[in-house]
């Protein structure tokens, strides 16, 4: 296992979400990662973090466009949790570390 | 109080002594040493209790890094807040200027402070959603006001850094 920090650039795409849809997942299925048991990165709701802040964090950490980041944020807000990403364990660990760096409630779960 | 962006700085002007004092309290509000609840919230487990190996390695390798990250952000904010030093007893309003390159540190530290205060006071979701609560009649009311005030600052910084008007807190 390797816990490391990294960052991605913030995307600044505008969108106007109207309803809460189940957001799509980015699934890693290439190369060696195909052999790994898949893990998922889950973000849990908390009453303190601002919706705008959570959206910004999803954009930064996963590189998601604003509309997709907002869909995930709304899923967290309304359903209590959202699966942000699934794939190889090492990368999932990295994402969870970055989310904790932004003080979101995030966990790794084996699928 | 007025808040606006001027070139590469965020300017909070016409700060009355009460709000200036709340700003001064940001760094100390992030301190989790006096509160296991606050510590638990800022340093949560990365997986369920059944994932013992992951949780143990996290404690060993990641928590110290997170502590350094949070401490570094808090020190940046504390440095900016030195502008308010010596004005504690002044009845005149004052101004705080935050360089835009410190925006991330401010977002992180304000979030640390809000989460730590909420955990320390064990606020309910209903209380946290009550943005109109007034007047401030107790230490608990003041803590809630602090959370909302820091949230307002976060919203402003976010708007200025992302350039998008957003919905209010949730």
Image (cartoon, rainbow, N blue to C red):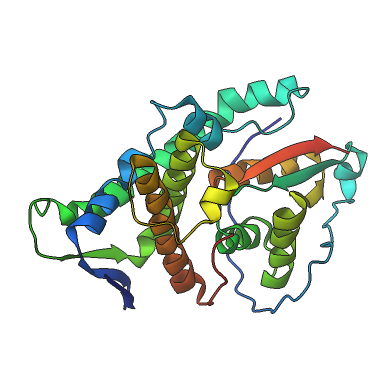
Percent coordinates x, y for residue A91 in the rendering: 73, 44
Compared to residue B123, the image places residue B152 above or below, namely below
**Foreground: B8 or B25?**
B25
Q: Quadrant of residue A37?
A: top right
**Foreground: B10 or B155?**
B155
Compared to residue B125, the image places residue B33 above or below, namely above
Percent coordinates x, y for residue A56 in the rendering: 59, 62
Q: In which quarter of the image is the C terminus of chain B?
A: bottom right
Q: Residue furthest right?
A: A35
In the displayed structure, does residue B4 sit left or right of residue A55?
A: left
**Foreground: B142 or A22?**
B142
Q: In which quarter of the image is the N terminus of chain B?
A: bottom left
Q: Which residue is drawn at 67% across and 62% down?
A: A63
Q: Which residue is drawn at 48% across and 42% down?
A: B118
Residue B69 shows in this picture: no
Percent coordinates x, y for residue B104 in the rendering: 44, 57
In the displayed structure, does residue A31 sit left or right of residue B48?
A: right
């Amino acid at each position: 296992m390797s816990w490391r920090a990294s960052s991605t650039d913030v995307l600044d795409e505008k969108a106007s979400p109207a309803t809460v849809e189940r957001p799509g997942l980015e699934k890693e299925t290439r190369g060696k990662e195909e052999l790994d048991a898949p893990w998922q990165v889950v973000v849990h709701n908390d009453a303190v973090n601002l919706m705008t802040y959570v959206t910004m964090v999803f954009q930064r950490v996963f590189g998601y466009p604003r509309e997709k980041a907002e869909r995930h944020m709304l899923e967290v807000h309304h359903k209590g949790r959202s699966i942000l990403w699934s794939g190889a364990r090492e990368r999932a660990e990295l994402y969870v570390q970055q989310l904790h760096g932004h003080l979101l409630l995030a966990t790794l779960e084996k699928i | 109080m007025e808040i606006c962006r001027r070139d590469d700085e965020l300017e909070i002007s016409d700060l009355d002594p009460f709000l200036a004092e709340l700003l001064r309290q940001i760094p100390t509000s992030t301190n989790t040493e006096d509160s296991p609840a606050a510590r638990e919230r800022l340093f949560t487990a990365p997986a369920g209790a059944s994932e013992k190996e992951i949780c143990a390695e996290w404690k060993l390798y990641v928590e110290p890094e997170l502590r350094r990250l949070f401490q570094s952000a808090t020190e940046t904010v504390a440095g900016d807040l030195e502008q308010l030093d010596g004005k504690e007893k002044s009845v005149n309003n004052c101004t705080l200027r935050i360089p835009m390159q410190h925006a991330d540190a401010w977002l992180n530290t304000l979030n640390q402070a809000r989460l730590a205060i909420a955990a320390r006071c064990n606020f309910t979701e209903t209380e946290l959603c009550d943005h109109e609560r007034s007047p401030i009649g107790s230490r608990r009311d003041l803590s809630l006001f602090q959370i909302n005030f820091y949230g307002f600052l976060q919203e402003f910084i976010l708007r200025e850094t992302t350039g998008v008007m957003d919905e209010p807190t949730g």
